[in-house]
Image (cartoon, helix red, strand yellow):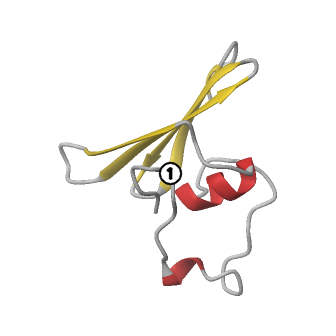
Amino acid sequence: MLTADGGCEAEVSLDPSTRPLPREIALGVTECELVKLKGGRPTDVLIGESGKGQREVQVLYSEPGGREIYMFTDNRLSRIVKPGQGEG
């Protein structure tokens, strides 16, 4: 899982031998998999909790074409918002 500064906390369940890095950013990837696939730390990370006690994280990347926002619930990508594409 990501920390507020965009670094990854170690998590045993994400050992590369048991869960290889996905080939692309898609719904269901973890927070740290996103950072590895993007190739660098995010511009900003907001960490909170839903009313149901779930961990909710918004990861922002400022790209040349605009901001990309990746939304996670309990360490799984649930929504993507990119400039000109709306929600994905």
Relative depth, front residue between 5 and 84: 5
Whole-percent x and y of residue 6? 50, 51
Q: Secondary structure at mark 1?
A: loop
- Give the residue displayed 75% in from the left and 21% down from the top: 64
Type of amino acid at the residue the image marks with label 1: Gly
Q: Determine whether 2 is above or below 50 in the image.
A: below
Q: Is residue 51 left or right of residue 77?
A: left
Q: Is residue 40 left or right of residue 5?
A: right
Relative depth, front residue between 27 and 1: 1
Q: Quadrant of residue 50?
A: top left
Query: Which residue sits furthest top?
Result: 84
Relative depth, front residue between 76 and 43: 43
Whole-percent x and y of residue 36? 69, 58
Q: Determine whether 84 is above or below 42 in the image.
A: above
Query: Which residue sits furthest right?
Result: 23
Whole-percent x and y of residue 47? 34, 46
- Give the residue displayed 51% in from the left and 59% down from the top: 7
Q: Which corner quadrant holds the C terminus? A: top right
- Give the residue displayed 68% in from the left and 49% down from the top: 40
Mark 1 surroundings within 10 Å by alpha-carbon count, few (fewer than 14), some (14 through 19), many (20 or more)? many
Image label count: 1
- Give the residue displayed 41% in from the left and 57% down from the top: 3
Q: Is residue 8 left or right of residue 41?
A: left
Whole-percent x and y of residue 78? 51, 44
Residue receiving disc 1: 6
